[in-house]
Image: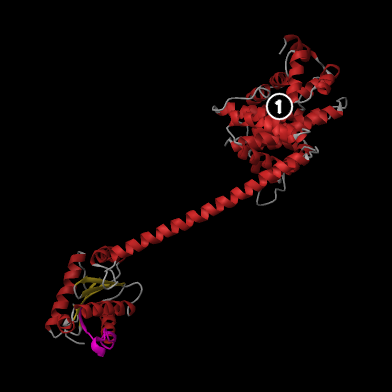
Amino acid sequence: MRSELEATLGYVRNLPSPPGVALRVIQLAQDPDADLGSTADVVAMDMALSARMLRIANSPLYASRRRVDNLAQALAMLGLNATLSLALGFSIARAMRNDPDLAREPYERIWRRSVIAAMASRKLGQAKGIRRAEELMLAGLLQDIGALALLQTQPIRYLPLLDQAADHAGLAALERQVLGCTHAEIGGWLAQHWNLPGYLQTAIERSEAGGGDHDDEDTFNACVALSGPVADLWLSEDAEAARIRLLPLIQARLGLDSARFDAVLAGIGESLPEIAAIFDVHIASPSQLEDILDHARELQSLRSLRELQDAAEARRQADESEHRARHLTEQISRDTLTGVFNRHHLESVLEKEFDLALRHDWPLSIAFLDLDDFKRINDAHGHLVGDEVLHAFAQALQKLLRVTDTVARYGGEEFLVLLPGTEEAVAVGVMRRVLTDIAATAMAWPGGTALHVTFSAGVATQGGRERFSSVADLLKAADDVLYSCKHHGRNRVMSRSQPTPGA
């Protein structure tokens, strides 16, 4: 900026300056020890500012599940950084707007652009993943503060430039030609003069130049710089042409393609009524821009629908994969002939149940079963009938027990039943009832004749009277009882504590 203009501005008596509350907010923004309590005390000094903070806390921009009824709740919901940024923006904007000597129409035009740019800066930053929404809004809002200062301090020199400029880019060119600098540079100087935070000084000064694409701070400044041209879409006579001119810049500086940029425009359009009401400006969307926004919203809806469909398809595929995995697991753990668990799976379940019984000191009974005279069935009717009998027996046995009990084929015509939480006497009673039901049920009909089977069972129980040191010991105990059961004539259930044979 030309030194003479800087000197002139430095001595202008009516140079805009922040009001008292804004000065206090600026001090708080620079204070690393500032907290919500001290900020609330400052904001509460200005009733109009307090009302605006309440209004924005209840706006869709900060959608809360419950209504905010007082300043303390509002500031707690917004947080310290948002409170400082928004309070600073509100107070500075109101101070400049209340100048009675300001040319109203040019001021309103610049201010309208600033409010749109505030929202545009926020939405562009969100599209780039920048989590400094309020700082972006404040920088977008104040980027043309230099133009307002020139309008206020040098209306005779500056008003003709505003009238001659066809657009904002043309205004910057005229400013450099006539003043030797742009309003962005003046705004940066003014921000420094006011002792605004450093990021604001930089963003305002670079608001006519853009920024880089990679560094986070450059991306922040690029969002602010591009927010002005985006705001011009709402103020342009040919919004579609302005959008087409702007797209390459958006792509180059922010890496947003046309679809993502249109989504940003749609987001701005949806939020403008609320922010316009908060800052007391009227913003109308040109019909061309409304068509663009409607198209963007339609694309967003289609994209959302596609995402939902993709998510549903992904869930369906995941469910199918899970089902297949369960099915494969079942296949691996099931005996292919009988459909009950195989010996490998039994060993895993028995280890877990044994550990639980030890840990919680509850009983665990097991029953070793062996079909009586099964070899005779194979010899008399063939192995196919024998297989049919094994399958029917296993399925019938499974149905006669609880869902918490486990039935597994141990090998050949031997089966093992796990009865968790079951004492020995109860287990013996259960297995004798099962034996009675099994004996009464035909397992096959070779040649139209009912074929019935019986079994012998040995029961052993961990807990109560006996304590086994391992699963192997428990299995051996049940197997020993089964051997004794066969020795005494088969077709019976016996246990370690009930060695007397009986059906």
Residue that extends furthest to the bottom in the rendered view of this protein? 449
Please indicate whether residue 244 sits to the left or right of residue 359 in the image. Answer: right
Disc 1, SS: loop
x, y percentage for residue 427? 27, 78
Q: Is residue 423 above or below residue 181?
A: below
Report the quarter where the C terminus lies. bottom left
Using the image as rendered, state which of residue 459 and residue 204 is in the foreground. Answer: 204
x, y percentage for residue 189? 70, 18
Using the image as rendered, state which of residue 145 and residue 170 is in the foreground. Answer: 170
Which amino acid type corresponds to the residue marked 1 in the rendered image?
Gln
x, y percentage for residue 429? 27, 83
Specify the quadrant of the image occupied by residue 287.
top right
Mark 1 — residue? 143
Residue that extends furthest to the left in the rendered view of this protein? 487
Specify the quadrant of the image occupied by residue 318.
bottom left
* Neighbour tally class for label 1: few under 14, some 14-19, many 20 plus, Cα within 10 Å: many
Q: Is residue 127 above or below residue 11?
A: below
Report the magenta residues as a range. Answer: 437-458
x, y percentage for residue 30? 64, 26
Res. 163 visible in picture: yes
Q: Is residue 276 above or below residue 65?
A: above
Q: Is residue 117 above or below residue 303?
A: above
Using the image as rendered, state which of residue 424 and residue 247 is in the foreground. Answer: 247
Q: Find out whether residue 435 is within the magenta segment.
A: no
Please indicate whether residue 225 sits to the left or right of residue 166 in the image. Answer: left
Specify the quadrant of the image occupied by residue 470.
bottom left
